[in-house]
Image (cartoon, helix red, strand yellow):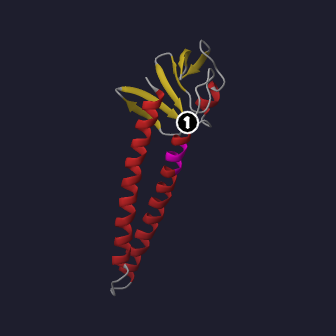
Amino acid sequence: MKKAALNDALIRSLESRISEATASIKDLEASRDTNGKSTAGDKHETGRAMAQIELENQSKTLKELQLKHAELIQIGKLEKSSTINRGSLFKAGEQWIYIAIGIGKFNFDGVEVWVVSPTSPLAQLVLRKTLGDSVLIGGKQASISEIQ
């Protein structure tokens, strides 16, 4: 598994989600503005308020996605290290783990990779470990066999 290719796939995935969130925001803005032009009273004011709340939620989601996107771009520029740290892709037992951003399980070329934040408990457990070190992951001891 290649870290650069995984990072690129994650960036593309986030870009797709950013596009979807942007389109959703445009639709919500149009819906909110349409609901606001009615003279029917409270029913339309409620609809406008609901659209505004959903718009705020989507805007928050978009901002979070954009921050994760920027973080992945920065992580892609990090140098390879012999110890596990932010930006490391490593294999422990049969499991691949990428310390980058908090996404969870990500399927890459048919392989399941855990993509975790550097502040996650799992990342904190393995930071500064090196090849051959043993770690407890999911209740099982695993040896670190590769670090990228």
Q: How many marks overall?
A: 1
Extent of the magenta region? 67-71
Residue 58 in percent (x, y) is at: 44, 59
Give the image quarter of residue 118: top right
Residue 127 in percent (x, y) is at: 64, 27
Whether 119 is drawn above or below 14: the answer is above
Whether 111 is drawn above or below 29: the answer is above
Q: Amino acid at mark 1?
A: Lys
* Circle 1 residue: 77
SS of the residue under disc 1 = loop
Q: Residue furthest top?
A: 132
Whether 35 is drawn above or below 105: the answer is below
Give the image quarter of residue 41: bottom left
Q: Residue at x 62, y 20 (%)?
A: 82
Magenta-drawn stretch, dominant element (helix, strand or loop): helix
75 relative to 23 in the view: left or right: right
The verdict on residue 70 being magenta is yes
Q: Residue at x 39, y 82 (%)?
A: 42
Whether 19 is drawn above or below 111: the answer is below
The verdict on residue 91 being magenta is no
Residue 34 in percent (x, y) is at: 33, 77
Give the image quarter of residue 111: top left
In which quadrant of the rendered image does the N terminus lie?
Answer: top left
Residue 110 in percent (x, y) is at: 34, 26
What crowding class fits label 1: few (fewer than 14 Cα within 10 Å), some (14-19), or many (20 or more)? few
Q: Residue furthest right?
A: 128
